[in-house]
Image: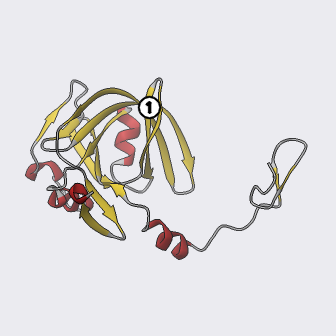
Amino acid sequence: MEGLLNNEISASGGLIGLREPVDTNKFRQVMRKLAGSVTVITTENGGQLYGFTATAVCSVCAEPPTLLIVVNRSARTHPHIWRKGAFAVNVLADNQKDVAEHFASKGDCQFSAVAYSRMESGVPVIQGAAAYIECEVEQTYDVGTHTIFIGRIVETGAEEDTPLIYYDARYARASSL
């Protein structure tokens, strides 16, 4: 493991001499260069629907089909994903910038202006999305200010639409790729 952050590995397998993390503003600047599909994470709790715009979504493995989402614990949707134990990842189509902005806002009644259907679990799926992935929470990990939710995929769907992309703090169309 030579060269791993220029640190030595102790006999117990842990790193010796961990370096300080990079400045938060530098981190944000660099992360803007990481293009990602725009998603809306949705859930239901006690009959109420919740959602927020996110790009922190990643496949984990295909066997079993699993993905992860990363949610700030201060986000209003966080406790509802926690309580429900289920969520959907709605991969927005490149014509759904308005939906991304709508769910990124702090307004109430988020689903009053958005067409959706409900899965058997009650979790909403946004109509017109390029794809959706419904998950049941299998594991959670707290890291800093966020929770990583590992979801076992229980249902999926996809359309022919291309996804909306977020890059350098702007929305972009993937159709030019």
**Compared to 28, does 154 lie above or below?**
above
Residue 70 or residue 172, whichever sits in front:
172
Q: Picture coordinates of residue 78 (x, y %)?
A: 38, 47
Residue 105 appears in view: no
Residue at the image position 78 percent from the left and 57 percent from the top: 3
Question: Can you tell which quarter of the image residue 67 is in?
Answer: top left
Q: Amino acid at mark 1?
A: Thr
Label 1: element kind: strand
Which residue shows up at 42% across the image and 68% down it?
A: 32
Compared with residue 167, is residue 2 higher up or lower down, i.e. above or below? above
Name the residue at the right extreme: 11
User: Residue at image x 15%, y 61%?
Assistant: 98
- Locate residue 93, reporting x and y percent: 19, 50
Q: Which residue is mark 1?
A: 66
Q: Is residue 14 rendered to the left or right of residue 103? A: right
Q: Nearer the viewer, residue 165 or 109?
A: 165
Q: Looking at the picture, does residue 166 appear above or below residue 93?
A: below
Which image quadrant for residue 66?
top left
The picture quadrant where one finds residue 141 is top right
